[in-house]
Image (cartoon, coloured by chain):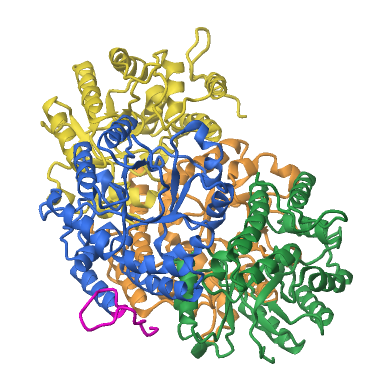
Chain colours: A yellow, B blue, C green, D orange
Amino acid sequence: MAFPKKKLQGLVAATITPMTENGEINFPVIGQYVDYLVKEQGVKNIFVNGTTGEGLSLSISERRQVAEEWVRQGKNKLDQVVIHVGALNLKESQELAQHAAEIGADGIAVIAPFFFKSQNKVRAEELLDGIQDKIPSFQGLKFSDTDLLDFGQCVDQNHQRQFALLFGVDEQLLSALVLGATGAVGSTYNYLGKKTNQMLEAFEQKDLASALSYQFRIQRFINYVIKLGFGVSQTKAIMTLVSGIPMGPPRLPLQKATQEFTANAEAKLKSLNFLSFPGLKDGNMEACS
Amino acid sequence: MAFPKKKLQGLVAATITPMTENGEINFPVIGQYVDYLVKEQGVKNIFVNGTTGEGLSLSISERRQVAEEWVRQGKNKLDQVVIHVGALNLKESQELAQHAAEIGADGIAVIAPFFFKSQNKVRAEELLDGIQDKIPSFQGLKFSDTDLLDFGQCVDQNHQRQFALLFGVDEQLLSALVLGATGAVGSTYNYLGKKTNQMLEAFEQKDLASALSYQFRIQRFINYVIKLGFGVSQTKAIMTLVSGIPMGPPRLPLQKATQEFTANAEAKLKSLNFLSFPGLKDGNMEACS
Amino acid sequence: MAFPKKKLQGLVAATITPMTENGEINFPVIGQYVDYLVKEQGVKNIFVNGTTGEGLSLSISERRQVAEEWVRQGKNKLDQVVIHVGALNLKESQELAQHAAEIGADGIAVIAPFFFKSQNKVRAEELLDGIQDKIPSFQGLKFSDTDLLDFGQCVDQNHQRQFALLFGVDEQLLSALVLGATGAVGSTYNYLGKKTNQMLEAFEQKDLASALSYQFRIQRFINYVIKLGFGVSQTKAIMTLVSGIPMGPPRLPLQKATQEFTANAEAKLKSLNFLSFPGLKDGNMEACS
Amino acid sequence: MAFPKKKLQGLVAATITPMTENGEINFPVIGQYVDYLVKEQGVKNIFVNGTTGEGLSLSISERRQVAEEWVRQGKNKLDQVVIHVGALNLKESQELAQHAAEIGADGIAVIAPFFFKSQNKVRAEELLDGIQDKIPSFQGLKFSDTDLLDFGQCVDQNHQRQFALLFGVDEQLLSALVLGATGAVGSTYNYLGKKTNQMLEAFEQKDLASALSYQFRIQRFINYVIKLGFGVSQTKAIMTLVSGIPMGPPRLPLQKATQEFTANAEAKLKSLNFLSFPGLKDGNMEACS
């Protein structure tokens, strides 16, 4: 596998795996999905077969096919396609990693063990220390905890910027940017990528007031849906709503989002101007509720 | 699949998957393992490919082979061979269930979802209520929590004794027996089956003092190893020690038990007369430490 | 203080502190409360100013007065009056202990530190080991966890029966009796003491079927109210209902139980024959729901 | 009580309660402590009798005396003296609040109930909504969680800046500043106030690189001591070391910090230039470990 020459940076959408109503993978819409991310959301990096993509609910054969389709459709359009290859069984994980290399993916990612697992919290900053001696191809990590002491100390240690330190708690991204996050991986970048990119640009230009204003609007939405119950099923429903591309139902054990959820999420998106409609100026701030 | 005509009752050993030093499955020792359980431990039911058997660290192909070997070796020797078929991916779980039926396993078992999972604690007594309407072949459950209110209410509800209610916290079995547990599934029955059967018999005869004495000796051992760090790796080491059958190392992410652990466990087993040696009477009680 | 010559055994009611509607302590009903416990529930030991008694919501002065009144009213009627003297501030705790000795209480009890506290779970069996060297007057413990390995190892260690090992999870008492609990402390013994005593007697006579039948009926009630939300406020409402003695509202931060809760609890108590009415035979079992 | 006319802002030191070796309060050093905070650390607001001050381990009488002494010594030197008046018993809390008003404290603070407490996580942003209808004198909150979605939504809601929103996780302060925190309450501002003020100034001037550099140095220290075990006892030892003012031992149930801890903390402070010594330039950065 050719390891990425340029660092992974900016927003990385944790892709949904689109499914048909009967639960099979809906391969034909993936091309359209790529175009949507690039053109409508300004997101050019993807993280395939992760939690959002229900990767662990797919068979090995399905995971290979999904990875292939994203790589094929993303060619010359996306900057980096990262394939999540974690599995409970190490051999399957190795097989998926080998396959990702063969199809020309830009990188792989692996979840930490979650069935047989460490009793103690493992600190990322301790893992990073000397990791390239153990994993010469190590490129970076996705940090999805709210312990910003740990994240900060990862950045502190990474002063030569050898690693990509991507933050994974979408609703708190600004707090990680100020600590030096080099990018972010998340499910909301599928449909809030454009708004989040505007936050990134404002931060880059040290316009902290604008950056905070974007962060608060994003927080209002996420805060709202968290209270309704927010997971992969709900992400599928929201993405279908915002992009117009049918994402379909999730696989068991997940249950399809309720119509009530979708109606409430839609109303909230509208009130925040997160759905585009003719005649509405996109930049309007929601009056504070 | 022919569903069991007689209820699953008594002790069920959660079998270890024996491995060679290089991590491959050591099929040839399974026959010897069956004989050991039946003859030395008096255990005639097994639970294959569960947590203790590292079922989720095996590939689907390996799980099928392991199930086949236990069924083949157990024929005419074991009462019931239950195959754990749980997987993150529902299709693989269905494939394993179909396979278990084809090879003539006596039953299957499935772990509750553990990656995408319910936010709230699910009470077993609520699940049991009306379950045969949803799963006509439902036979019972393995209850591995210390919430004996929930377990008790399962038994209370099961007054027609239609289900097997098996307890899964080995070190607290006596407390579940008094609530009406119909059996037990656990890893310690691999090597403490005989002692535990003696406890069951004493309880059956209402000799509560003897039953308690057995329970306390078993607790002393488990309490001791829990403090040292007790999991599947350690179970493999103890079983190798007690049975003389090589169980081998665990697969990653588990790490082999340390020699220090094994030496300490051995000393404790000896002090409790849980290792058989000529010249020592088996029934001697350990002096209270 | 004269330490108890006989061991504390059997049921110990964790007493409620009766209050008037405006939140002051309702001292005049305490005498009636003592008679109710002894005559109607057959409970002759009490645990005063504990969690159920809102001890930590009372001022030091109030705690002293409450203790005095229970000791006075219990004279020649109760076997043992134990005063909980735990406080966040060690000096106040010492003052309360001194006071308990002066008024002739039979014993004191102290909660483990809960504001500044140990990071690790402290095992009771490790605390017991050698405790009389540190606390010569140590008499026993109230164990209110569901870890019956730990509780069992306390009993195992207590083979000379020097300590009272009282179990504090009312709905699982039978499981602790079989492990050798010497008694029980709980809030439900205020109104289910008679039923629980019947369970104790059945267990004593090795009539395990009857003991289990009592345990299941008690579990049905507790299981039901737990689902409705069960705490000190609800205990006050239930005790008012069952005993006819007004327990009044709780103090803030607790909120009074809702009328809906009380109505539901009453209906459940009736369906289980836990409220005495003329013309209903007390021993009738509830049909299994 | 005269409520503060100007908002509480900037750093607020959660004061230690100095004690003598035999555990009595060391009142005479409080004047010196005030001078140290103002002159050496640039900290002019204090939070008295909180967790760091072992407020809940003091008697009511002691809490009154401690509050009086800080108010007296702080007169014309400190901007705001806030007295923590939380207690398990509401009457005592009211008495302390009344007393704080009488002695001329600038404000009071109250911990959320922690013995009888809510089962569900309470979101601060929900509490803030409409709070002045219930508590007309409400001035703000100390937010000591890492859930920056909740904190952000508090700030978002507080667009009229009517409340002080103080952050309480010292090692993550920069991440809260970018979200609009108006100040911070913490124990480390006793001895790292000057460094933290430098971070605040850099942030104010949009010099994010410098602010981050300060944050990382502070994180290195806190990260280091957390791994050694960091609490009130250790804070007393560090403050004694850095300020030269004897803070004494903590009260039970806390145990005095070990000499090994103190030696290690001292070495770390030196390596970070957090102890002032002649001949060392204060601004030198630690080489990255």
Which residue is drawn at the image coordinates 20% and 51% (left, top)? B251
Please report the bounds of the magenta region as a residue range. B271-289
Q: Quadrant of the C terminus of chain A?
A: top right
Q: Is residue B267 above or below residue B22?
A: below
Coordinates of residue C35 in the picture (x, y in percent): 84, 73
Rendering coords of residue C282 (x, y %): 78, 58
In the rendered structure, the answer to whether residue C220 lies left or right of residue B227 reads right
Q: Position of residue C70 (x, y in %)?
A: 80, 77
* Residue C131 belongs to magenta span: no
Residue D97 visible, this orientation: no
Number of numbered markers: 0
- Closer to the camera in the image, B260 or D210: B260
Is residue A31 visible to the viewer in this orientation of the structure?
yes
Q: Is residue A77 above or below residue A287?
A: above
Magenta region includes residue B282: yes
Q: Main secondary structure of the magenta part?
A: loop
Observer-nearest of B257 and D92: B257
Above or below, comparing residue A184 to residue D263 in the picture: above
Q: Of residues C218 and D226, which is closer to you in this image?
A: C218
Return the x and y of residue C107 as percentages of the image width and height: 67, 83
Q: Front-most of B72 and D173?
A: B72
Instruction: Give the side of residue B77 with respect to residue B180, left or right.
Output: left
- The outermost residue toward the top is A278
- Quarter of the image containing the N terminus of chain A? top left
Q: Quadrant of residue A205?
A: top left
Task: Give left or right: position of C43 versus D156.
Answer: right
Q: Residue at x 14, y 49 (%)?
A: B27
